[in-house]
Structures are given as structure tokens and as C-alpha cells.
Amino acid sequence: ISDSGLYELQYKDYIMDNLRLELPEKRALDLKTIGNHISRDSLEKYTKALYGVRQRNTTKGLRNLKATKELIKNHFKRLGISTYTQLKTFTNYTAENIIGKIEGQDPLKLLIIGGHFDTVEDSPGADDNASGVAAVMELGRVLSEFKFAYSILLIAFDLEEEQLLGSFSFVNEGGLMPEDSVIGYINMDMIGYTRSDVNTQLIPDNFDKDFPVAYEFVKRNEFRGDFVVEISNKRSRHLVEAFERAAQEFVPNLKFTRLEVAGNGESTRDLRFSDHSSFWDAGYSAISLGDGANTRNPHYHSSEDKLLDLDYVFMQNIAKAVFFSTLDLAKVQEQKTVCVLLNQQ
């Protein structure tokens, strides 16, 4: 553990653990096996590397933010992903949205996948949101092995905990160009906390009236906190349907339920508290995937949001479903390399 409080990734070990073997020719995609490239061990490694208070108001938090940004940028660059940042000044802090682009045959048609890396003060942010950023990093590792018809942007957002300023800046202040055609944004925020005991999933007031289908699902599931919460709106149905198709076909053990809000969620404001709503408000399609935040995780926004509570298999299953939905939405063309994990042989 470094003096910054972050677990350090040793990239020498990373390269040895992850062998990229160039293929001499195109090969048919074997969808039954390529999902196994999404690695539970990699997700755990990235999450531990990100772990630590990442907040701008303390010296330690600033140091951890700097280390986190370098970690993510170096990760994308080592994968050969085109990497750049979008800067935003907020009080005396320079925020950075870190963007990796896997360019498709149509460079202007974009599928965007992301999560935020900042935390609230005093929280080491294991679930919120090292879990989501670890999934973005792992998706970058595996998606970089393929060619697509459309481009993929992988984004680690800053300042989510400051009224979504990082994602607001991205969609409104130059992150997207007028000529870009956005397929949609898939947000991952708190994807690591599960509980299999009955009555571990809390239900907000009026949930049964606002979302009767989801309520019946949770009731049949005996209020166990072991499923993905999908937040969507009508404009974004194609995204959530792609995720559900992928989950049903390739990750059958992953439970999920959909919460489709009216409009941009103005009447259900608790479902707007992540970066997907910046995209909604700018007129783009977006969904958010998570574990229910404070309706499940008792350590939400606290100093107890720690690594020992994370379910890495759950994280792996969500990342797998996002991976397969990305192959669909971005129109995978071919596999250009074989991604072999030596430590799984």
C-alpha cells in the first residue's frame, strides 16, 4: 500500500498477467467463450488500486485523486487506446474527465460507457465508485481486442459528487461535438454490493405505485439485495433492452429489474443522482446500472464503504452483460487479438 492510501498496480505484473497475442487473420467470434475474458481477478485488482479517499478538500484526497487519474490514463494508454482528458476548473481544483476512444469504422457514431472516480469526503469509495470505474477499466482491456462499426468512448468522470459537474461539462462544454451521433451512455455507479438474505433490499416510499412491475419482482425475490437496478427512461429503451438481452443470453445468473422514469426523472429525483441524468437533460439516451445505493448498501457515502463488502462475481456479471450489449450496440466486426489471462490457465 502506498503512502497515498491507494493500492498500487504494478504494470510489469499487469503486462505479464495479460498477454495480447496478435492474430494473423480474422477469426469468427466464439460468443460462448469470449465473455470469459471479463476477469473477476482483474476487477478486484483495479478496485484495490482505486481504493482510497478521492476528494479534493484534503491533502490526502487530492494526492489520491492525482494518483487515480494517472492510473486510469496509464491503463488506457498501455492498452493502445487513444486517451485524452477534458479539464474543468472548480474553485481551486482542476478536474479531469479521462476519456479513452476505441475508434470504429464510423468515428463519429459513439457508444459511451463510464463511471465516476471521485468520492465524498472521508469515504474510501469501494462501492461508490471504485466498483464502476474498475468495470470501465476491465471493459477497456477486453473491448480493445475487437474492431467495431461504431466508436466507443470509455470515460472516468470527475466531480460526480459535486452535483454531476464532470458529466455536465462533458455533454455541455465541449466533450461532444455537434457532428457526433450518440447511440447512448451506459453508466455504472455502485455495482459491487449484494446481500442474499431476505429483506436486505429496502423499498422507497411509493415504490409499489411508481414501479409496480419492479416491486413485484423484488417481492418475488423476497426482498433480497442481489440484483441489478436499471434506471432508464423512454428515450433510452434501446440501451436497457440491449443490456437485458445480453444478460438473459450470456449471463443467466444475473438478476435485474428496470425502473423506467417519466421524462428525465423530474418526478423521481432520487433516480437522477448520477451522471446518466446529465445526458438525459442534454437530450441523449442513457441508462444507469447499480446496486440500489442507500436502499441496499448501509455504508453509502460513509467511511465504511470498504473493499471487504464487495461482491466481485456480481461486478463481473454486470461487466459481462455490458460487454455483450456493447458488441451489439457498437456492431462488433471482428476480433483482432486473443486476450489470454495467464493466471487463469
Image: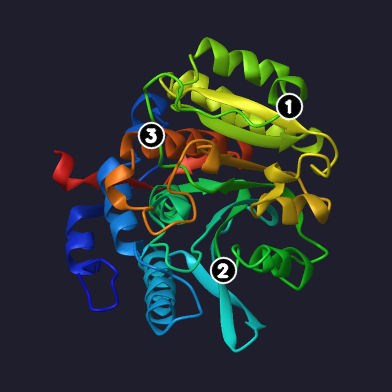
Circles 3 and 1: CB atoms closer than 8 Å: no
Q: Nearer the viewer, residue 194 or 102?
A: 194
SS for dot 1:
loop
The residue identified by callout 1 is 206
Q: Please tell me the numbered disc located at residue 314.
A: 3
Q: Quadrant of the C terminus?
A: top left
* Tag 1: amino acid: Asn
- Mark with earlier residue (3, 2): 2
- Choose mark 2 or mark 1, whichever is in front: 1
Circles 2 and 1: CB atoms closer than 8 Å: no
The residue identified by callout 2 is 158
* Tag 2: amino acid: Asp
**Classed neighbour count for the residue bearing mark 3: other residues with Cα under 10 Å, few (<14), some (14–19), many (≥20):** many
Tell me where residue 201 appears, x and y as whole percent. Answer: 50, 28
For residue 234, side relative to residue 106 (left or right): right
Total count of labels: 3
Q: Quadrant of the N terminus?
A: bottom left
Tell me where residue 213 appears, x and y as whole percent. Answer: 69, 16
Q: Residue at x 55, y 74 (%)?
A: 84
Q: Nearer the viewer, residue 121 or 93?
A: 121
